[in-house]
Image (cartoon, rainbow, N blue to C red):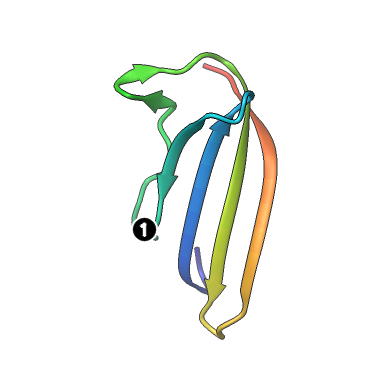
Amino acid sequence: YRGLASLKIYIFNTWGEFVYSSESLEAFGWDGIHKGIPVQNGNYVYKAEYVSRGGVKGEKAGVFILIR
């Protein structure tokens, strides 16, 4: 996260159901668990909103595949 002042990240499953979020640069990231239960392998969508140390705001979104 070098160069970022803040970061918010959200993860949703294939059907758009919320799975995970974090607003901390210190978070280790999503461990593939939702409500104490490992989620299924498959496609997940992420959305990240960030602010750089220079004050530039941005957003990124995409899809990733979870494979255990």
Q: Quadrant of residue 57?
A: bottom right
Residue 20 location in percent, x, y? 43, 38
Q: Residue at x 55, y 66 (%)?
A: 50
- Against 13, is 58 above or below? below
Secondary structure under tag 1 reads: loop
Give the residue at mark 1. 24
Within 10 Å of disc 1 (Cα), the crowding (few <14, some 14-19, many 20+) is: few
Question: Which residue is painted at 65% across and 61% down in the image?
Answer: 59
Give residue 34's quadrant in the image.
top left
Name the outermost residue toward the right.
62
Please provide percent x and percent y for residue 2.
Answer: 51, 69
Residue depicted at x 64% and y 24%: 14
User: Which is nearer the eye, 30 or 49?
Assistant: 49
- For this view, does 21 lie left or right of residue 45? left
Q: Is residue 49 above or below residue 53?
A: above
Q: Amino acid at mark 1?
A: Ser
